[in-house]
Image: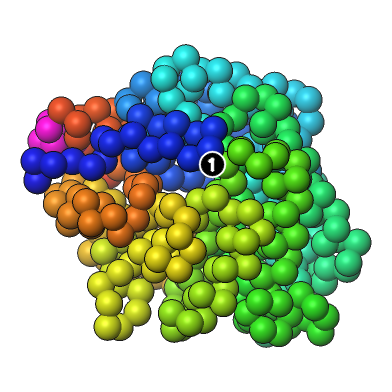
Amino acid sequence: MTSKNSLFQPFKLGSLNLDNRIVMAPMTRNFSPNDNIPGDNVVDYYRRRAEGGVGLIITEGTCVGHAGASGYPSVPYFHGEKRLAGWKKVVEAVHEAGGKIAPQLWHVGAVRKSGTLPEGDVPGYGPSGMNVPGKVNRQVMTQQDIDDVVAAFAQAAADAKAIGFDAVELHGAHGYLIDQFFWEGTNQRDDHYAGSIEHRSRFAVEIIQAVRAAVGPDFPVILRWSQWKQQDYTARLAVTPHELERFLLPLSEAGVDIFHCSQRRFWEPEFTGSELNLAGWTQQITGKPAITVGSIGLDADFTPKPGEMTFREADPASLDTLLERLDNQEFDLVAVGRALLANPAWVNLVKAKRMDELKPFRKENLGELI
C-alpha cells in the first residue's frame, strides 16, 4: 500500500461533514419481516459499521410510500410512523458511534411481481409496463402514477431530513424504476418522458427537483446510477462521452449534489481512449463529487451468470490502484460493499494497516448479517 492514503482525508459538502472518504455501499437485505419496520437487528447492523470507521453509510434500499414500490419480501419501508421511528433509532445509533448516514430511497418499478407480500395483488409499475425489453407484462404508468411516485420520493426525503439523516440517496440504477425510464429498452412511451436521452431523464429530473424543494438547498442529494442493468449486464445508457454529458447535465442542474456511479469493477475504463472510470467521467462532466464503487478491496475476477443478482465469494485485494486514482482526484468518495459485510471494522483495519486481518467474503464470515 502507498504511504499516502487519501481515503482518510475529510470531505465536506453543504451540511455533510465526513471524517473520511469511505462510504458503505447500499446492499439489499431482507431482515425487516415485522411489518417492514427496521428493528433492533438493523440498528445493530449499521451501528457496527459506524463503529468500524465508515465515513458515510448509505442504507439498503428502503421503499417509498407508493403501493408498487416494493418487489422483495421483508425489506424495510420508509413510510408510516412505526417504520420511520425504526429508522430514527438507526440514525441515533450511527450518530452516537460517530458516523453519518443516508437512506437509499427505492422504487423497484416493473421488477415487482404481483403477489409479492405484503401488498399482494398490487402490480409492478413501469414506464412501458416492461420488466425486460420487448415484454409488456406489468402496469403502464399513467401521468397520475408518475405524479404519485414523484410525490412519494419528495415525502420520503422530507421525512429523512426530519428524523435526522445526513443526506438522501435516490436509487436510479440497476434496472429499477428510475432506471427503467432512463433505459430505452424499457422506456418505449410516446410522450415527453421518452425518446431522446434527455427526455428519458425527465422523470428523474422531476423527482430530483421535488426532493430538492422538500429538503432545501443545503441538504445533500445523492443519485446512484449505472450503465448496467440486472436485466442486462451489457446495457449502456451512454456509449460516448458526449452522450454521457447529455444524460448527466440535466440531472446535475436539477439538484444532484453527488453522483454514485455503480460499476461491477471500479478499475475498468468507461470509454476507449481514456483510463477514467464511470465516476471519473461523471465528475469531469458535471463538476460534482462522484462516488466510485465496484469490487473495492476484493479480488473480483469473475463474470456473473445472466440474471444473477448475488455476488460471489472473493478474497481481500490490494488497494494500491484505488489509492493512486483517488490521489489523482479521479473521484471523491469510495463505496465499499461486500468487504464491509465480512469485516464491519474494515475501515479501521485499513487505517491501521492491518490488512492481513481482513476476512474474505465467504458465507461463514457473514454471521453479523443476521
Which residues lie in the magenta part? Answer: 353-358
In the rendered image, residue 212, in percent from the top left (x then y), is placed at 70, 47
Q: Picture quarter containing residue 168?
A: top right
- Relative to 157, residue 177 above or below: below
Tell whether position 355 is magenta.
yes
Q: Position of 192 compared to 113: left or right?
A: right
Answer whether residue 142 is visible to the viewer in this image.
Answer: yes
User: Which residue is depicted at the point 12% across and 31% down?
Assistant: 354
Extreme-right residue of the structure: 144
Tell whether position 338 is magenta.
no
- Relative to 183, residue 61 above or below: above
In the rendered image, residue 142, in percent from the top left (x then y), is placed at 88, 68
Answer whether residue 364 is visible to the viewer in this image.
Answer: no
Q: Position of 93 compared to 341: left or right?
A: right
Quarter of the rendering occupied by the C terminus:
top left
User: Which residue is depicted at the point 35% across and 79% down?
Assistant: 271
Q: Position of 330 compared to 218: left or right?
A: left
- Relative to 349, residue 1 above or below: below
User: Which residue is depicted at the point 34% across and 55% down?
Assistant: 331
In terms of secondary structure, where does tag 1 sit?
A: strand
Quarter of the rendering occupied by the N terminus:
top left
In the rendered image, residue 351, in percent from the top left (x then y), is placed at 19, 31
Depth order, front residue of 161/299: 161
Q: Which residue type carries mark 1? A: Glu
In the rendered image, residue 362, in percent from the top left (x then y), is placed at 28, 43
Depth order, front residue of 17/102: 17
Mark 1: give few (<14), some (14-19) or many (20+) Cα within 10 Å. many
Q: Position of 174 compared to 134: left or right?
A: left
Q: Which residue is mark 1?
A: 60
